[in-house]
């Protein structure tokens, strides 16, 4: 009896989500009944699970026909062929990000895709795409009547926006040059309007062009989304503007991704994850507040979305516009004149829109104020005057909770976390001690757990305590209408519930709030029209930090915070920024008083060049997590020693410095010990070659008996925190 014909099968490489420290970091081989194009999304079995995967180009081994036993290979479960494949530019971006940041390509690729794709059939996807196509067609018909003007349609009225001379000059430079660009504009100079003008011109120039607009934090996305929808919704439809960030539900994230991938979405607004959005017609990338550390991922593939935006722009021939009032020192250095080696074109807007003036910076020398006072008498008087005039004040302290530590006055017990090398923070509002690292939360003890003393007291202060003390100090003060002073606190604790942040911001914008208290969450990106005074209560902590980036972060935060004041040019009052400091003559505060970012940047870059720090050198951190600190450090030190015995790594050691392993600043989190090793080189190429060759050494070192307790390790290229 003749045997039935054996079906033809094709060997197919598929990326799935596997971390770099595993032994399955590359593409896996599967069998397919048909030849699938690279970039096709598939569902594949792995162990007992079924995962989402991306068909990938064969690696060198597969291309050379390396022997694989088909009997040991499993077939692809399903191909999502209703979706167009992820294009070559997107795949090139994934390959570069995985290579540069020393991660597995599957880890990067799959983290960029909505997980819900795994649960949909091709038929369901086809229906969703058909619906999106109808929406896009309706928007295309409506947009034919849209005529771009020198000022696009205003957010609130059908009138052209009147641009300042600086805005017109910057837009002209943007149109005439290829970029990348760094838009260095003072707070309130109208950078967002420039972003929208450039986007409007792009969308009008091509029927399918797409723009990606990135913001550093989720809480800045809704207000920007509202502005973009108000500006472009009437022309292209509200569905042409979508958001992408981790705060969205899985269904929302899927819909936004499909809209971008299909081309129905013309504008994508998102946080750092949006840099990997599949946008087949991408022509413009805008990175707002490009200096913000939030663009650097702190877990998984530790990529910099800002730097990948520059690379993606080059890949896809898209213009890239970085914007900030306080650019990162790396971007500032790259935007020096081309004759000096600069790679970006710097666009400057030093003036505020209209007659708005930058705030006057006042420094309060806390050495001459009453001991242990939280709000100095001069600052309290200034806030009181603003309340009497019906104006708003903002007071920020970059530490939430009531107090960072509880302490026993007898035995010196402190509220340490039993699982982390950190203190639990006292939250008075619900009488809890909370660890902000592992999440442990317990009721405050009635007495000291060590000696039984009932007198345990808070040390230091957070925003909760600051709010309480302000309420006490302003208890007798009245608003112009005779009502009591209204104080609102905005931080991670008060905005945990859905819609809480939006409701609190609405209170501020409507004028129902006299004093706004919060962390850095309120210090950047918000357009508060009624605030005329901003105060930093305790900014000195970062002045003498061991982290060489701390002054840059502090200057940026303070300048951004100062920018929240005096944004409404119709208010005649001189806006002010108050600094309570024990070091009033510090050069950082001198530069801040003059609003002189270029002078500050020049001094910092000079110091970094003398110390051979980035951007004049290149760094990577190798971090290890283990059951004991000794094991974590032993793993790193053994891997360092083994590098000199491997031919491909030993040859590069002359161009590198490998420092000894040390505990991380918070050495233990959730009972896991953490250590790190710094690798530094004056050559980016030498560093990358070494890290790539060192991966095998790290894998083999982990198998040694001395490293038995190592749980995981990771490489962080271009780290922001050391």
Image (cartoon, grey):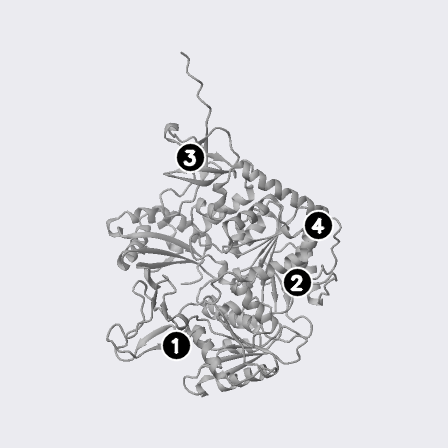
Q: Mark 3 points at which residue?
A: 29
Q: Which residue lies furthest to the top in this view?
A: 1
Quarter of the rendering containing residue 671:
bottom left
Q: Mark 4 points at which residue?
A: 205
Query: CB of mark 1 within 8 Å of CB of mark 2?
Result: no
C-alpha separation, residue under disc 4 versus residue under disc 3: 43 Å
Position of residue 330 measured from the top left corner of the image (x, y, whole percent): 52, 62
Q: In this view, does 705 lie above or below 440?
A: above
- Residue at point 66%, 77% (across, down): 571
Query: CB of mark 2 within 8 Å of CB of mark 4?
Result: no
**Callout 4 secondary element:** helix
**Callout 2 secondary element:** helix
Position of residue 170 measured from the top left corner of the image (x, y, whole percent): 67, 62
C-alpha separation, residue under disc 1 versus residue under disc 2: 41 Å
For marks 1 and 4, give the one nearer the viewer.
1
Residue 647 visible? The answer is yes
Pointer 2 or 4: first along the chain: 2
* Image quadrant containing the N terminus: top left
Q: In this view, does 249 lie above or below 389?
A: above
Q: Residue 517 carries which label?
A: none
Q: How crowded is mark 1: few (under 14 residues within 10 Å), some or many (20 or more)?
A: few
C-alpha separation, residue under disc 2 versus residue under disc 4: 18 Å
Q: Mark 2 points at which residue?
A: 193
C-alpha separation, residue under disc 1 versus residue under disc 3: 57 Å
Residue 664 visible? The answer is no
Q: Residues within 10 Å of mark 2 (few under 14, many from 20)?
A: some
Pointer 3 or 2: first along the chain: 3
Q: Mark 1 points at which residue?
A: 460
Pointer 1 or 4: first along the chain: 4
Q: Determine whether, in the image, residue 236 is placed left or right of residue 689.
A: right
Q: Nearer the viewer, residue 63 or 370?
A: 370
C-alpha separation, residue under disc 3 versus residue under disc 2: 49 Å
């Amino acid at each position: 009896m003749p045997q039935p014909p054996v079906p033809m099968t094709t060997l197919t490489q598929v990326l799935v989500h596997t971390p770099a420290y595993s032994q399955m970091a590359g593409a896996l081989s599967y069998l397919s009944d048909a030849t699938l194009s690279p970039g096709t999304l598939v569902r594949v079995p792995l162990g007992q699970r079924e995962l989402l995967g991306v068909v990938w180009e064969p690696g060198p081994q597969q291309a050379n026909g390396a022997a694989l036993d088909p009997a040991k290979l499993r077939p692809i479960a399903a191909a999502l062929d209703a979706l167009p494949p992820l294009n070559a530019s997107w795949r090139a971006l994934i390959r570069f990000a995985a290579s540069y940041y020393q991660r597995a390509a599957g880890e990067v690729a799959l983290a960029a895709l909505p997980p819900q794709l795994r649960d949909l059939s091709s038929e369901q996807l086809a229906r969703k795409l058909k619906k999106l196509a109808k929406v896009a067609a309706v928007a295309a018909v409506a947009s034919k009547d849209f005529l771009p003007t020198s000022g696009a349609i205003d957010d609130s009225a059908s009138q052209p926006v009147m641009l300042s001379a600086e805005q017109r000059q910057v837009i002209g430079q943007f149109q005439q040059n290829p970029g990348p660009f760094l838009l260095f504009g003072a707070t309130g100079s109208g950078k967002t309007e420039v972003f929208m003008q450039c986007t409007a011109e792009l969308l009008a120039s091509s029927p399918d062009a797409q723009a990606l607009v990135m913001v550093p934090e989720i809480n800045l996305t809704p207000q920007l989304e509202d502005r973009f929808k108000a500006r472009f919704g009437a022309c292209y439809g509200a569905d042409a503007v979508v958001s992408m960030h981790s705060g969205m539900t899985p269904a929302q994230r899927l819909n936004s991704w499909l809209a971008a991938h299909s081309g129905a979405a013309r504008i994508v607004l998102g946080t750092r994850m949006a840099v990997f959005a599949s946008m087949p017609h991408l022509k413009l990338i805008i990175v707002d507040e490009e200096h913000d550390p939030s663009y650097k991922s702190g877990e998984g593939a530790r990529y910099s979305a800002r730097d990948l935006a520059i690379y993606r722009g080059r890949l896809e021939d898209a213009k890239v516009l970085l914007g900030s009032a306080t650019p990162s020192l790396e971007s500032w250095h790259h935007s020096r004149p081309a004759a000096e080696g600069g790679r970006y074109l710097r666009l400057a807007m030093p003036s505020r829109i209209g007659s708005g003036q930058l705030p006057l910076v006042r420094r309060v020398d806390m050495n001459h104020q009453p001991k242990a006072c939280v709000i100095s008498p001069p600052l309290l008087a200034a806030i009181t005057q603003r309340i009497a005039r019906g104006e708003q004040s903002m007071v920020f302290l970059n530490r939430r909770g009531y107090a960072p530590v509880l302490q026993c006055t007898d035995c010196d017990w402190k509220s340490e976390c039993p699982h982390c090398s950190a203190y639990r923070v006292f939250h008075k509002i619900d009488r809890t001690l909370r660890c902000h690292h592992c999440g442990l939360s317990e009721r405050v003890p009635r007495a000291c757990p060590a000696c039984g003393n009932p007198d345990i007291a808070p040390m230091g202060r957070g925003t909760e305590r600051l709010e309480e003390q302000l309420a006490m100090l302003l208890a007798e003060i009245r608003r112009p209408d005779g009502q009591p002073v209204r104080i609102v606190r905005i931080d991670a604790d008060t905005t945990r519930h859905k819609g809480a942040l939006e409701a609190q911001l609405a209170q501020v914008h409507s004028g129902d709030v006299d004093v706004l208290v919060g962390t850095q969450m309120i210090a950047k990106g918000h357009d508060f029209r009624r605030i005329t005074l901003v105060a930093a209560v305790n900014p000195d902590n970062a002045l003498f930090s061991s982290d060489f980036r701390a002054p840059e972060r502090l200057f940026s935060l303070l300048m951004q915070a100062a920018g929240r004041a005096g944004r409404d040019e119709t208010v005649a009052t001189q806006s002010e920024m108050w600094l309570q400091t024990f070091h009033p003559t510090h050069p950082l505060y001198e530069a801040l008083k003059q609003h002189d970012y270029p002078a500050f940047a020049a001094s910092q870059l000079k110091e970094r060049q003398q110390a051979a720090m980035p951007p004049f050198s290149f760094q990577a951190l190798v971090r290890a997590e283990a059951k004991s600190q000794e094991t974590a450090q032993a793993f790193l030190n053994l891997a360092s020693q083994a590098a000199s015995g491997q031919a491909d790594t030993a040859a590069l050691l002359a161009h590198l410095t490998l420092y000894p392993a040390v505990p991380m600043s918070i050495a233990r989190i959730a009972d896991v010990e953490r250590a790190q090793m710094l690798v530094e080189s004056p050559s980016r190429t030498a560093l990358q070659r070494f890290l790539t060759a060192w991966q095998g050494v790290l894998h083999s070192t982990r198998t040694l008996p001395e490293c038995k307790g190592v749980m995981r390790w990771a490489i962080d290229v271009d780290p922001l925190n050391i």
